[in-house]
């Protein structure tokens, strides 16, 4: 069960200045500066560390089938409802796949970490220190209405997101851009703010979503408002039809400018992508059985173990497959709202965490399919382990000296999730430990067996949830907490209510299921949207309301890391600090994709490690589809 859910090399002139050797004749200094201007790199892409895997003349991505046929439809389900196709506003509930209309200047791949290749550009230019980047745009890129995309659209898009993007984006990224200018109709330059770590900045600039200036201004659009008319983009799909709250259909743009682009060959193979909405997972599964939609990524371990014995599977009309995945663990967890006074004390958070029995849940509820999450960067080299290494200590000691961290952060083992008994939902050893923690925190057992503080208030917490499939997981957890004397309850709401309560500005919850954001294999500036103090009250990624000046400093070091080894060490230190505060109750992950689909889809024999790609590089076999339709398996 899982929640359905991107070297600053110093110039020699600086070294000269730092050494005090400034008694050089003015003309000689000018000549030296000219001689030592950093070389400008011209490339078809950029990699954070190391070299790009693909050469400039690559014909297609290595994991796609370049001869994959085009045509047909793939359909999936989404929970709840929607009332907007604008993915860039916090107003309303956005539609599934709402970013399908748009592209960015650079594009990543599903088999390479930290690589970004030119999509809307022919080449990119940047100095060795990455303090600026020029994108030489393609002249054949058009928006879906046929109008050309130019540097003017890029500058407009940057300014639009700078001024009207979601608050968590603006608070982190706006200060990093010094200027963005169109050098000519097809050349645009991003200059980054001096003092900013430049490692990720060219790729960050290249990841900007590009919208049409003429369409936006001509139709008097507003990025901050909910809408059922999508903004105009350059992507391979456009909106076909929409039934608000029920269904959305995207169709492949027959005039898509990039159909022959090496990054597109073998991709975007379906003529239509349809999303059907269901009130809950049980209804969605029944819809799948009856052919209402055709591809299901199964997130419920119970369903996977017990619910796929229906005729469609036993007859072979539906494929049930376990496919490999190299994706990082999601960081799925029970998240505390740290704004609540109840959760200010880490002893309270630790006690609550002790009462979740993963081992019993995995055996009894999950059929042994999952592994426990311990680290926010679980299953990577960035996960902290044991006491702090000498390299971590070098980073953490200054924060200790300033009083921002306790000295024990160096000697204590990295916090691991508690281990519980498999035999019973209630682990008595953990119950005793949790009880001692709450007693120490001033929450003692009083009338009715409930814990109260000195003001006589009960220790009351509420789990807020919209997925019925989580009810069977949270209910035993609630019972364990009640045995501890906590006045715990599970409150079920619909998806719209959940969004209204957990997103800014409300943040009206105690505990929810979510992800402790790790931002992938190469964390950078985007990590601040989840963990920086400036996002405490405005970010959908920082719903916990987390703020810690020591972590702010470590986040700066994450951005500044110039080698893979440096990045691993900094993130290990960050992981160690975050886990030490027990701000989450980690849940579980599995290192495979569990999917079911009607037997008319095909995919490359070897899938890339970092993407399932069913909407991107799978394709339809029309003969198999005809067979299924002939027997009435599809609607």
Image (cartoon, rainbow, N blue to C red):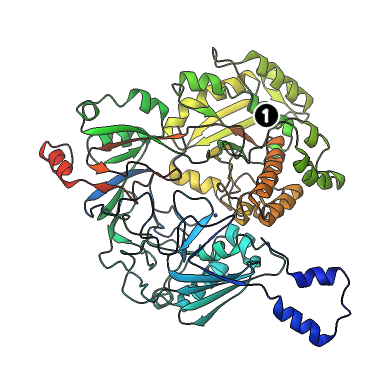
Task: Mark yes or no: residue 342 visible.
Answer: no
Q: Which residue is the extreme one toward the left?
A: 630
Q: Which residue is the extreme one toward the bottom?
A: 27
Q: Image check: 403 left or right of 275?
A: right
Q: Image check: 430 left or right of 209?
A: right
| Kind of element beneath mark 1 | loop
State the image quarter where residue 232 is shown. Answer: bottom left
User: Does residue 5 sit above or below 433 in this rendering?
Assistant: below
Give 78 or 621, whichever is nearer the viewer: 621
Q: Image check: 144 left or right of 207?
A: left
User: Does residue 360 sit above or below 565 in this rendering?
Assistant: above
Give 587 or 121, whichever is nearer the viewer: 121
State the image quarter where residue 267 is shown. Answer: bottom left
Residue 617, position as x, y percentages in the image: 33, 50
Q: Quadrant of the C terminus?
A: top left
Residue 150, position as x, y percentages in the image: 43, 77
Q: Quadrant of the N terminus?
A: top left
Residue depicted at 24% across the width and 26% down the height: 310
Q: How many marks overall?
A: 1
Task: Mark yes or no: residue 129 visible.
Answer: yes
User: Does residue 14 sit above or below 595 in this rendering?
Assistant: below
Q: Image check: 63 left or right of 91?
A: left
Give 69 or 469, whichever is nearer the viewer: 69
Give 107 or 100, whichever is nearer the viewer: 107
Residue depicted at 39% across the width and 66% down the height: 231
Residue that label 1 marks = 459
How crowded pointer 1 is (Cα within 10 Å; few <14, some 14-19, many 20+) is rated as some
């Amino acid at each position: 069960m899982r929640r359905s859910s991107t070297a600053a090399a110093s110039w020699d002139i600086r070294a000269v200045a730092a050494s005090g050797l400034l008694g050089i004749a003015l003309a000689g200094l000018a000549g030296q500066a000219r001689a030592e201007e950093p070389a400008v790199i011209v490339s078809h892409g950029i990699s954070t560390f190391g070299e790009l895997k693909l050469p400039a003349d690559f014909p297609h991505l290595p994991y796609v089938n370049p001869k994959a046929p085009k045509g047909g439809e793939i359909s999936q389900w989404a929970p709840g409802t929607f009332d907007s196709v604008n993915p860039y506003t916090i107003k309303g509930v956005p539609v599934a796949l709402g970013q399908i209309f748009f592209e960015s200047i650079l594009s990543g791949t599903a088999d390479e970490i930290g690589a970004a290749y030119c999509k809307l550009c022919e080449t990119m230019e940047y100095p060795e220190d990455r303090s600026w980047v020029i994108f030489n745009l393609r002249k054949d890129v058009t928006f879906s209405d046929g109008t050309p995309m130019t540097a003017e659209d890029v500058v407009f898009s940057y300014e639009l997101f700078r001024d009207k993007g979601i608050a968590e984006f603006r608070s982190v990224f706006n200060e990093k851009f010094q200027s963005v200018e169109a050098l000519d109709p097809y050349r645009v330059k991003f200059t980054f703010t001096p003092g900013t770590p430049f490692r990720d900045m060219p790729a960050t600039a290249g990841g900007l979503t590009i919208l049409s200036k003429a369409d936006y201004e001509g139709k008097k659009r507003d990025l901050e408002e909910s809408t059922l008319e999508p903004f105009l983009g350059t992507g391979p799909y456009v909106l076909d039809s929409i039934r608000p709250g029920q269904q959305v259909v995207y169709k492949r743009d027959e005039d898509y400018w990039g159909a022959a682009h090496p990054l597109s060959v073998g991709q975007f193979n379906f003529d239509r992508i349809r999303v059907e909405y269901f009130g809950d997972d049980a209804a969605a599964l029944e819809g799948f059985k009856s052919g209402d939609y055709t591809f299901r990524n199964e997130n419920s371990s119970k369903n996977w173990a017990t619910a796929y014995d229906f005729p469609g599977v036993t007859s072979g009309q539906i494929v049930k497959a376990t496919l490999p995945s190299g994706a990082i663990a999601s960081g799925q967890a029970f998240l505390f709202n740290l704004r609540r006074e109840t959760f200010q004390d880490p002893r309270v958070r630790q006690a609550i965490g002790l009462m979740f029995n993963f081992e019993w849940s995995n055996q009894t509820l999950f059929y042994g399919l999952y592994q426990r999450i311990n680290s926010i960067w679980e299953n990577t080299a960035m996960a902290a382990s044991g006491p702090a290494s000498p390299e971590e200590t070098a980073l953490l000691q200054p924060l200790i000296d300033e009083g921002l961290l306790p000295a024990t952060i160096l000697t204590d083992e990295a916090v691991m999730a508690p281990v519980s008994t498999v035999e019973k939902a209630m682990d008595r050893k953990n119950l005793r430990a949790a009880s001692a923690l709450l007693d120490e925190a001033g929450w003692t057992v009083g009338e009715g067996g409930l814990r109260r503080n000195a003001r006589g208030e009960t220790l009351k917490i509420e789990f807020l949830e919209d997925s019925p499939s989580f009810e069977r997981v949270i209910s035993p957890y609630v019972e364990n907490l009640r045995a501890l004397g906590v006045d715990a309850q599970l409150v079920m709401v619909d998806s719209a209510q959940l969004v209204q309560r957990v997103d800014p500005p409300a943040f009206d919850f105690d505990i929810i299921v979510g992800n402790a954001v790790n931002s992938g294999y190469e964390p950078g500036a985007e990590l601040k949207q989840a963990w920086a103090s400036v996002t405490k009250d405005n970010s959908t990624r920082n719903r916990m309301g987390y703020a810690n000046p020591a972590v702010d400093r470590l986040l700066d070091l994450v951005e500044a890391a110039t080698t893979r080894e440096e990045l691993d060490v900094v993130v290990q230190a960050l992981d160690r600090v975050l886990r030490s505060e027990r701000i989450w109750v980690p849940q579980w992950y599995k290192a495979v994709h569990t999917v079911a689909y009607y037997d008319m889809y095909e995919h490359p024999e070897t899938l890339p490690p970092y993407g399932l790609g069913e909407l991107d590089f799978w394709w339809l076999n029309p003969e198999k589809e005809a067979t299924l339709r002939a027997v009435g398996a599809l609607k």
